[in-house]
Image (cartoon, helix red, strand yellow):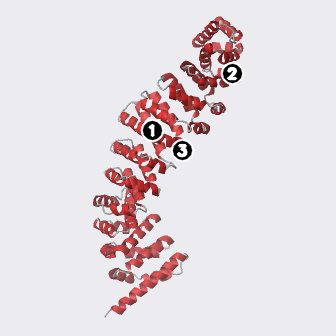
Amino acid sequence: MESLKKHLECLKLCGDETESHNQILESLNGVLLALAEDMHRCSSLLRDSGIFPALARILERNPRCAVKAAQVLAEIAKNEEMKKLCIEADLVLILVPQLKSTDEEMLLHTGRAIGRICYEKRDLQEELVKLGVITSLVRILTEYPENEALTRVDLLALCNLADLDSAKEALSKTNVAELLVKQLRRAEKHERLELIIEVLQALVQNDALKMQLVETGVHEALSEILLRLQGSLRAEDTLIVKAASDLIVSLLLGDGNCIRMVQLGIVHQLLDLLEKHMDNGDVSIQHAALSALRNFAIPVANKIQMLEEGVAERIKMLLRSEMPPVQFKLLGTLRMLTDGQAEAAEILGQDTTLLNTVVQWCNSKDQAGVCGEANRLLASLLSHSRSQEVVKAIQQAQGVKHLVSMTTSEHVIMQNEALIALAIASAISLEVLEDSFKETKLVQNLHKLLQDERTGPEVKYNSMSLLCNLLNSGDLRQEIEEDNFKETLETLCSYSNACVVNQAVMTLQILKDKTQKTRLSSP
């Protein structure tokens, strides 16, 4: 301790550049040695010594001794009480300019000192961003990617700052995404992988940075890590797999830039990822990729591009999966792709293998989600193709009965989708569907919907639209007359909804006209 006192006194007196560099370096080394031996005992001496102004002077005026001074500060800042003194002495403001140095050792010690002083101190961290520290951190990562110790300090700093919106904004104007993906690909140690993934997880909360990461292929790098560690039972490998999986999920979901992502070709990369993880891969990745695919298929521009690039065909190949959640999302993606796309709906609607699979899943009563989505896909193929060939193909695959059953679903949206699809199909090819309608008692189902007070106005309206088409069949019209629809329609003519009233009046008139014509034509 006596030796430490002498060194501190020397530094206090020898703060300017005219003093002996050797003497200053000897005293700085003496302080480092004392700190290494007993930090706690040194703290009281340091607190009363006035060393902080001396260290500040050395950093500003004595380039030959500045590196060692930064190292001393980095060691002192390990102590919580000493951090406060560093802050009070404005040492952070003096340290920040040192991050522009080209001396790797200076960068290392300065980075450590700043990181320790500012750890979990949000006000100071915000100030660092204002002082332009982000630019310095990105420069270091660019110029010294092979320096493991310096890169680690740099990544820790990014990790500490990345939660700040101001830091993310500053980072979005740099090439940090590219640099981090390069670091991710070359990282081998678990600690380094965890650190990089933690930084990335914070950055993907920013839309601009997320897009940059996608452009640089971060999901591919993460997928490679998952494939490398797949099946490992080591605890550290499991943690990395979990972190990488969570990051992929964050990348794929909730993105407002899905058109741009499709333009960048991420859909095929997702499909590659799915194919690799389909049989025994990470379930969370499967769900994230499938949800993203479905979301990507919503914008019209994406539908067109995805269909042109053969995405529907690749999705059909994945339908071999025996996992209900996967089946559910694949069906939903196909339904999104065909929405408003007549040509695609017509092609898929005539694919015998696909239709047989979908109809089979319509019977999956123990998997309500898959069953419902399969029914909705059938309805979508009919509604958007408006094709006689699709009507015939679905009839031959025995899918019509499922659509008739769908009209009585507990979900209103599914009821309406089924009623609209059957109305379109019956307008196109009633003769093809007539027998199925009779076997499934469609007429009786419609009557129940119209009579039930709980049935909503839209379902009533669509039921009557379908009923009008059914009146063009002699046999079905006879069923309608025998089931006394006339009375029900007359009641609906005074319904509370104007659209329903108008449709009821029109349907009743058509029924009367058809009945009268039949009587007049009878011998």
Work out whether residue 272 can be spotted: yes
- Foreground tag (2 vs 1): 1
Residue at horizontal 38 percent and vertical 43 percent from the top: 273
- Say what secondary structure mark 1 lies in: helix
Badge 3 amino acid: Asp
Residue 85: give its label: 2
Asked whether the residues under the numbered discs 2 and 1 touch, taking CB atoms below 8 Å apart as contact, a structural biologist would say no
Q: Residues within 10 Å of mark 1 (few under 14, many from 20)?
A: many
| Quadrant containing the C terminus in the rendered view | bottom left
Counting from the top left corner in percent of width and height, residue 411 is at 45, 63
Badge 2 amino acid: Leu
Q: Using the image as rendered, state which of residue 362 and residue 452 is in the foreground.
A: 362
Asked whether the residues under the numbered discs 3 and 1 touch, taking CB atoms below 8 Å apart as contact, a structural biologist would say no
Q: Is residue 287 left or right of residue 74?
A: left
- Say what secondary structure mark 3 lies in: helix
Counting from the top left corner in percent of width and height, residue 23 is at 64, 6
Residue 207: give its label: 3
Seen in the picture, residue 522 relative to 63 is either above or below; the reply is below
In terms of sequence position, does the residue under pointer 3 or pointer 1 come before the other? 3
Counting from the top left corner in percent of width and height, residue 54 is at 69, 15
Q: Using the image as rendered, state which of residue 326 and residue 276 is in the foreground.
A: 276
Counting from the top left corner in percent of width and height, residue 488 is at 46, 81
Badge 1 amino acid: Val
Seen in the picture, residue 55 relative to 488 is either above or below; the reply is above
Which residue is under mark 1? 218
Residue at horizontal 70 percent and vertical 22 percent from the top: 89
Q: Is residue 392 left or right of residue 219?
A: left
